[in-house]
Image (tube, grey):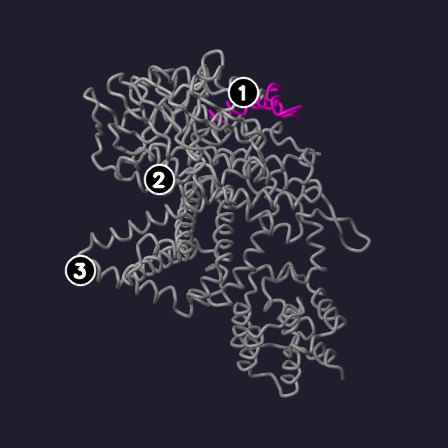
Amino acid sequence: MLRSELFLQTPQLRVFLPFYYTLWADSVLTPSEIKVVHQLLRELDWVGIEERELLMEYLNPQNTPSPKELKAWKKEIQTLDLETTESLTDIGLALVKNHDAHASISEKNIQSFRAAELALGIVGKEAKYIFKEGHITITTAYHSDSRFDIPKMTEVLNGSQAEIIKKVKTIISDPTFSLREYESLGDQREQVLQWCQALAAQGFGAWAYPESVGGKNDMEGYFTIMETLSYHDLSTVIKFGVQFGLWGMSVYFLGTEKHHQKYLKDIGSLQLPGCFAMTETGHGSNVRGLETTATYDHQSKTFVIHTPNESARKEYIGNAALHGRMATVFAKLIINGEDYGVSAFVVPLRDEQGQLIKGVRIEDCGRKMGLNGVDNGVIYFDQVVIPKENMLDRFSLVNENGEFESPISSDNKRFFTMLGTLVGGRIGIPRSALSASKTGLTIAIRYGDSRKQFGPPGGEEVPILNYRMHQRRLIPPLASAFALHFGLRYLTKRFLEHTEEEAQEIEALAAGLKAYTTWYTTKTLQECREACGGKGYLSENRIDDLKNDTDVYTTFEGDNVVLMQLVAKNRLTEFKQEFSDMNMFTVLNYLANQTKISLTEKNPVITRSTDESHLLDMDFHLNAFRYRERAILVSAARRIKRHIDGGMDSFDAFNVVQHHLVNVGQAYIERIILESFQEAVKQTTDKPCQDTLTQLCQLFALHSIEKNRGWYLEQGYMEGVKTKAIRKMVNQLCWELRKDAVALTDAFDIPEACIYAPIAIRK
């Protein structure tokens, strides 16, 4: 008798069929899988010698079942009603009963099979999908649906900002804001200027400014405007941000009342176009190293702004090439030959007729990779004289005696306080980037839902979004988009409500979320492009503009790698402070608690657990994120201390562990995002929306753990059987969320005029 015939004709052996088919479905039998089945066979008391030899024969990696055998096993399994089964064990038991109603397997042995199934990482209902006809039956039948009310999900996303969001969307959906192709660089720049003027006329530009200068005194509303405008044209968003954010906010936050009254009304109405001139050719991230000088002349009560060399020229300055009439210029304050560090000054660039002021030279940066509607320029100053009152003097000033004064005595604290007031840009940029990602995902998911390729022999082709790899490409980024939405909402709230003591924490949080979100956007839009195939490469489908325009988001408002190191240094400072504030008793309690956590989370039951309820448990997710964050932080601190104790300079010590520091920042930010998402899920009152958000939150968490599985395995926090189960659970969540994918992008409520892609037009 052939081995396959023996397998099929022995009633009780049929319980193994679903297990063996699953093990061999990918043509690879791993050592861990062999180990699990060996253990199972040792526990079974009814398997005879001949049967055991047969079962062992199928566990030889070199003795692969033939295609005919696999097909016969699958055909036998497909005789069952799989909708009534929940696991491999259930399927196997049903096969036994189907062949011999009197055959039975003891409850003890059944539990052994269930334990083996968990050890193999086969998660829940995914088991029965394996035996559908090449997954085709279920794949063909699967289509878009929605378990939740889309407008209610939109309400959850909009929160308290629904009114201003609706107003902005109405404006950018107007025919005067129709997206179009441009005949030239000048044509594009002129169009973007006109759109910014129209937005200013709606009062959007001055939204965050005091009511006394025509504003609404609503910073949260300003961030929302930036985010919503980012569904439209990103050149317009950045020019809007340069004018009303960088230029206007620098005057608002670094200046005093006299500057507010003199400039802000005209800035908010775009009557006074301006620039933010910080970056120099020789110094971008290192603001303290700026070389432009502002030398005070007490006799004339003026400052002389000067570019001492080529590397000190102001570069990439938005609004400079064509439209800017004034600029906030960051320069070293020099009084009587002494350098008092970087301060900010309002410096004229052009007169009302648009002619350059004497001593100012500006070059056009020309075409860029993206954002070509923004007129970036290079600025040189040659002994440009400005009056004393043009110094933005909230944090530093020159008094009537020509002496330097500041309400903050520490040079270091004053410098970081000054920069800290400008952190709003690091909130606006990631929110803008996320909107671009949402647009890209909407285009790609709609296309994936409608584009059909391949199918069962003689049957219809199926939507490409039904294929697992396509789901893997787009649905985890979709979950991340929701996660980041709530993470950035949390950041905005913290920024608006923060105290002076929290300023450095908020600056680090903003830096980290800016870096994390813009990296996510770059990766996600590339995935969207590829997921749309050749159609994604066509400019008419807009993904190229989204990719090119957002690419620089990883650079401006701070290079992402530098920002993540800033986050890490803040975390290390907090870590050091945490211990310095403890007495000996508290330290001992802390160490005991950490030991308790390790013993609890690293015990073999937890590290190997593949139970579905455990894998989907939000406490498990958060504990895993917190453990990773803390462990990486502690190990970084130890490495730095070891280097310094060994005689290494602190600068060199930090340089040696830079890669480690970036991981410290990322782990911290991921934990913040997850906490924010989980809290948003708890606060959602509509049950269908909450259920869907719960699955998205679970997918975000498990996909993040899956990406970092190597680290968790190294740490002994998880074993291979668990990371394999997590991978399968990610697949299952992608599969279950696929039906909701189009509806979830619809919940973003992006105006159809802004999606502007033929492949995403609703049929």
Q: Earlier in the sequence, mark 1 or mark 3?
A: 1
Of residues 223 and 416, the one drawn nearer to the viewer in this rendering: 416
Q: In which quarter of the image is the C terminus?
A: top right
Is 127 on the left or on the right of 639, as rendered? right
Residue type indicated by callout 1: Leu
Instruction: Identify the element where label 3 is drawn.
Output: helix
Q: Is residue 196 visible?
A: yes
Numbered tag placed on residue 507 in the rendering: 2
Residue type indicated by callout 2: Glu
Q: Is residue 532 above or below residue 264?
A: below
- Magenta-tinted stretch: 163-189
Prevailing secondary structure class for the magenta stretch in the rendered image:
helix
Could you tell me residue 224's position as x and y percent? Answer: 45, 29
Labels 2, 3: front one: 2
Numbered tag placed on residue 584 in the rendering: 3
Alpha carbon distance from label 2 to label 1: 31 Å
Residue type indicated by callout 3: Met
Q: Disc 1 vs disc 3: Cβ atoms closer than 8 Å?
A: no
Q: Residues within 10 Å of mark 2 (few under 14, many from 20)?
A: many
Residue furthest right in the image: 458
- Residue 752, quarter of the rendered image: top right
Instruction: Identify the element where label 2 is drawn.
Output: helix
Numbered tag placed on residue 193 in the rendering: 1
Numbered tag placed on residue 233 in the rendering: none
Of residues 722 and 613, the one drawn nearer to the viewer in this rendering: 722
Q: Which of marks 2 and 3 is nearer the N terminus?
A: 2
Of residues 489 and 323, the one drawn nearer to the viewer in this rendering: 323
Of residues 621 and 581, the one drawn nearer to the viewer in this rendering: 581
Residue 190 in magenta? no
Could you tell me residue 145's position as x and y percent? Answer: 62, 42
Could you tell me residue 423's position as x and y percent? Answer: 37, 35
Q: How crowded is mark 3: few (under 14 residues within 10 Å), some or many (20 or more)?
A: few
